[in-house]
Amino acid sequence: MTVNPISPVFLLASVAVTLAPGPDILYVVAKGISQGRATAIVAATGFVSGLSVHTAFAVTGLSALLLASAVAFTAVKLAGGAYLAYLGIRAWLSRGLISLPTAGVNHSHRRIFAQAFLMNVLNPKVAIFFLAFLPQFIHREAGHVPAQFLALGLCFALQAWVIFSVMGISSSRVGRCLSTRPNLARFLDRLVGSIFIALGAKLAFIKS
């Protein structure tokens, strides 16, 4: 059976998550401001490359668990939904204040790539989020669960790279906008929070 887990809802949620203020996108913008567009793209590529580790874990670990047990599948989705709802509530309660990191000393592209890659891989929040987010769009009855995880992970990484690169290329304007408009950050927080809460609530009405 052909599996196509990429839905408009998944794409919308992925874009909203990527646009939300966080250490990754702020790092890319800061590097663009301090070292130029090419450096910002290198940083973006480093962050996105780190997502491959989280995708691989989801494919090899979660897919085996979910294929083996319908109960486990339901439990993982419910736990993930609860976590997404928790993130949504936190986002709504956030003041949306943004502080760009200090430009600091210029580093080589290789070092910047490595820093961005490790920041992503070693961030437990990214790992927990990935394990909570992807299962919401897996259809166990359709089969090919590893292929679905892989497709979702690659799609998320691709859109993240595009958005990060555009933000990095436009870093000077983006930096000024983020640092002088806290209301924009608050709006993004609430947009993402609403999406997270909706995804979590979806589990109460739709069967796995």
Image (cartoon, rainbow, N blue to C red):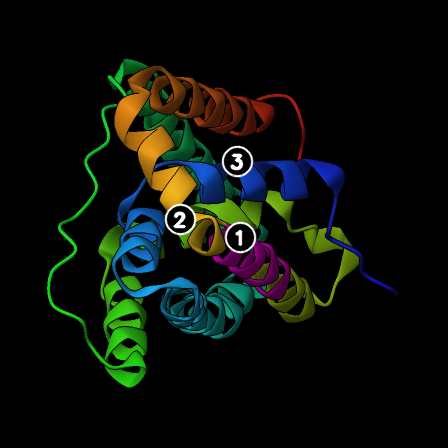
Q: Earlier in the sequence, mark 3 or mark 2?
A: 3
Residue beneath the point at 31% across and 72% down: 117
C-alpha span from label 1 to label 3? 15 Å
Residue beneath the point at 75% across and 63% down: 143
Tag in front: 1 or 3:
1
1 and 3 marks in contact (CB < 8 Å) = no
Quarter of the image for the N terminus: give it. bottom right
Residue beneath the point at 70% across and 50% down: 139
Quarter of the image for the C terminus: give it. top right
Residue under pointer 1: 166
Tag in front: 1 or 2:
2
Residue beneath the point at 87% across and 64% down: 2
Q: What's the magenta region?
A: 154-166
SS at badge 1: helix
Q: Position of residue 40 (x, y in %)?
A: 38, 63
**Nearest the eye: 103 or 79:** 103
SS at badge 3: helix
SS at badge 2: helix
Q: Where is residue 159 in the image (x, y as percent from the top left)?
A: 60, 55
Tell me, yes or no, if residue 208 can be seen here: no
As shown in the figure, which amino acid type bears the numbered disc 1?
Val
**Nearest the eye: 83 or 115:** 115
C-alpha span from label 1 to label 2? 8 Å
As shown in the figure, which amino acid type bears the numbered disc 2?
Ser
Residue under pointer 2: 171
Give the class, few, some or many, for how many residues have Cα within 10 Å of label 2's Cα (few <14, many ≥20): many
As shown in the figure, which amino acid type bears the numbered disc 3?
Ala
- Point out which mark residue 16 bears: 3
